[in-house]
């Protein structure tokens, strides 16, 4: 049995992420890890998304276990990445955030053959919670 926490992904986010992956010229190990996460996700309609789960375009407060620094980032698609306050779904930490709920943590591979455990502290903004189902 997997020791990874359950994750929830909206059907809209799933469709869009899968479409982006299909257009990639090659799949990196990081994207392969994201695909594995998506394969085990519970898929729900955007309207049924729990309000404490990180979805695409959510702004989330998180930290790495063992580090006191708290980060606040908005999870975006790569083509929407415009500043340091955002993180792409294809970045290692971005892939780790998707689908986690407040209080959950996930050990995730990082660059240089390291891994870190990310913990979700708060979902500050979630499009689904705001009634934005087709963002």
Image (cartoon, rainbow, N blue to C red):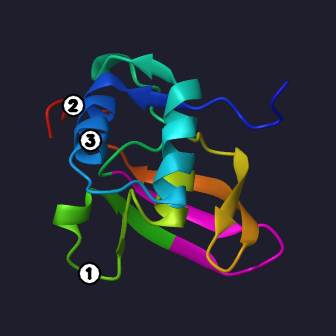
- The residue depicted at 40 percent of the width and 59 percent of the height is 90
The Cα atoms of the two marked residues, 1 and 2, are separated by: 25 Å
Q: Residues within 10 Å of mark 2 (few under 14, many from 20)?
A: few
> In the image shown, does 23 or 47 lie closer to the viewer?
23
Residue in the image at 83% along x and 35% along y: 3
Task: Name the residue tied to disc 1.
Answer: 83
Q: Residues within 10 Å of mark 1 (few under 14, many from 20)?
A: few
Going from N to C along the chain, the mark reached first, 3 or 1, is 3
Picture coordinates of residue 21, whole percent (x, y): 31, 46
Q: Nearer the viewer, mark 2 or mark 3?
A: 3
Q: Quadrant of the C terminus?
A: top left
Q: Residue 131 shows which numbered tag?
A: 2
**Label 3 CA crowd tier, 10 Å (few <14, some 14–19, many 20+):** few
User: Residue drawn at (34%, 56%), measured in percent from left and top?
Assistant: 26
Image quadrant of residue 113? bottom right
Q: How many marks?
A: 3
Q: Which residue is mark 3?
A: 22
């Amino acid at each position: 049995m997997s020791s990874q926490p359950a994750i929830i992904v909206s059907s809209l986010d799933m469709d869009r992420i899968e479409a982006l992956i299909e257009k990639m010229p090659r799949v990196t190990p990081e994207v392969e890890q994201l695909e594995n996460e998506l394969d085990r996700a519970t898929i729900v309609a955007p309207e049924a998304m729990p309000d404490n789960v990180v979805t695409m375009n959510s702004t989330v407060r998180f930290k790495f276990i063992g580090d006191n620094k708290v980060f606040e980032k908005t999870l975006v698609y790569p083509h929407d990445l415009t500043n340091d306050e955002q993180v792409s779904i294809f970045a290692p930490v971005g892939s780790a955030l998707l689908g986690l709920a407040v209080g959950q943590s996930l050990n995730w591979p990082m660059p240089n053959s390291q891994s870190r455990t990310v913990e979700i502290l708060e979902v500050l903004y979630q499009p689904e919670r705001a009634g934005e189902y087709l963002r």
